[in-house]
Image (tube, grey):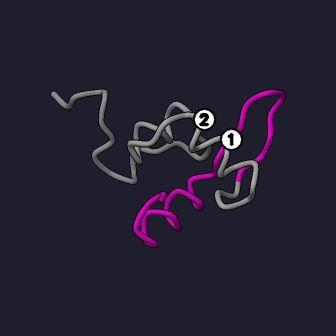
Amino acid sequence: MKDKRFVYSLDEIPLFVDVPYLCKIFQRTPTTIRAKCKTGKIKAVKDGSSWLVPKTEIIRLDEEGGIL
């Protein structure tokens, strides 16, 4: 059985993910993720007080080597 704390494949990722899920994928803090969403380095949409990141953006980030 796969450990639910990790993402093993891009196929497992939903169409949109929230900040905690993105933290799990890229091993970064919520503060870092939110700051990069706010500045546009991560293309995300605001849903109330939450950021949602599309799967296509996660794939782009992964191909570019992750989030620095």
Q: What x and y, as percent, mark residue 42? A: 64, 57
Which of the 4 quarters of the picture holds residue 25?
Answer: top left
Which three-letter amino acid code belongs to the residue tagged 1?
A: Leu
Give neighbour class at mark 1: few <14, some 14-19, many 20+ (Cα, 10 Å). some
Residue identifier under label 1: 52
Task: Identify the secondary structure beneath mark 2.
Answer: strand
Q: Name the residue at 39% across, 51% down.
A: 11
Q: Name the residue at 22% across, 28% down.
A: 3
Magenta residues (range):
44-68
Q: Name the residue at 80% across, 40% down.
A: 46
Instruction: Classify the position of the N terminus by image quarter.
Output: top left
Which three-letter amino acid code belongs to the residue tagged 2?
A: Asp
Question: Is there a contact, CB below 8 Å, between mark 2 and mark 1?
Answer: yes
Task: Identify the secondary structure beneath mark 1.
Answer: strand
Q: What x and y, as percent, mark residue 30? A: 55, 34
Q: Is residue 58 above or below residue 47?
A: below
